[in-house]
Image (cartoon, rainbow, N blue to C red):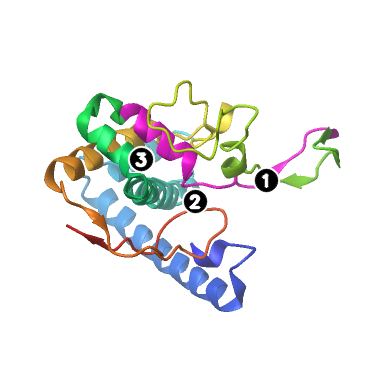
Amino acid sequence: MAGSDSVLGGEEAARQSHQAMASLVDYFTTLIRQRRHSPRDDLISALIAAHDAGDSLSEDELLGMCVLLLIAGHETTVNLIGNGLLTLLRHPDQLNLLRRQSEYLTSAIEEMLRYESPVQRSTPRFAAEPFVIGGEQIEAGQQISLMFGAANRDPAHFSDPDRFDITRQPNPHLGFGMGIHYCLGAPLARIEARVAFTHILERLPAIRLATDTPAWKPVTWLRGLKSLPVLV
């Protein structure tokens, strides 16, 4: 992930990233070969079956889908849970409210997605036609990136946007994007977060931060922690 960042990455991080991606591709290439020979009741076997039945997935698309699902489905949800827990621990009034009234868990997860968005900016897009935004002229074909993190703190759409409020309604955040680019895994991420926070609240009643300065991953397009030291 660090090597994929065009702002903070650097040559060494890029080299490590390319090496890691090559290893991941080798891993999935082997796994696809194994599943093709001995299918199981899993997603990769289902994707292979669709490919072998002449569906729309090419060999490269099959491999790319495996890589995408692992990275997009794991990295972002890990960051949602980590960022959300950090935010709750930094706002004990909201944590105590959630402990008293667990019915706020659904809206609390949505507020976590808004307040500390796991994905801070979009993958590159290309303008279909010229337009002006924020006083800046964008030409047709120009590459742009949407800043989800900024949009989720837009005072034109969120009252008191820098306040973490687990009861916030409505909450039209862009944590999962929007339109045709809306996150495929949004329902699963919400379920995983609900399960994680339900167990954290039940099993760790005395959880608290062990440091005031947790370390963040050196990536600008993702928002995630390297680790979150806590005391229980």
> Where, by quadrant of the figure, is residue 105 drawn?
top left
Q: What distance separates the C-alpha of mark 1 from that of mark 2?
A: 26 Å
Residue at numbered disc 2: 60
Upstream in the sequence, badge 3 or badge 2?
3
The residue nearer to you, when weighing 33 against 91, is 91
Q: Which quadrant holds residue 84?
A: top left
| Above or below: residue 146 compared with residue 107 | below
Give percent across and percent down for residue 21: 46, 65
The answer to whether residue 20 is left or right of residue 122 is left
Magenta-span inclusion, residue 107: yes
Magenta region: 106-131
Q: Position of residue 171 (x, y in %)?
A: 48, 26
Q: Quadrant of the C terminus?
A: bottom left
- Circle 2 sits in a helix, a strand or a loop, which is it? helix
Q: Nearer the viewer, residue 145 or 94?
A: 94
Position of 103 relative to 181 (above/below): above
- Residue at which label 1 appears: 145
Residue at horizontal 45 percent and vertical 62 percent from the top: 216
For the residue carrying disc 1, how many other residues have a C-alpha within 10 Å: few (<14), some (14-19), or many (20+)? few
In the rendering, at what x and y percent does residue 7 appear? 64, 64
Identify the residue under disc 3.
Answer: 47
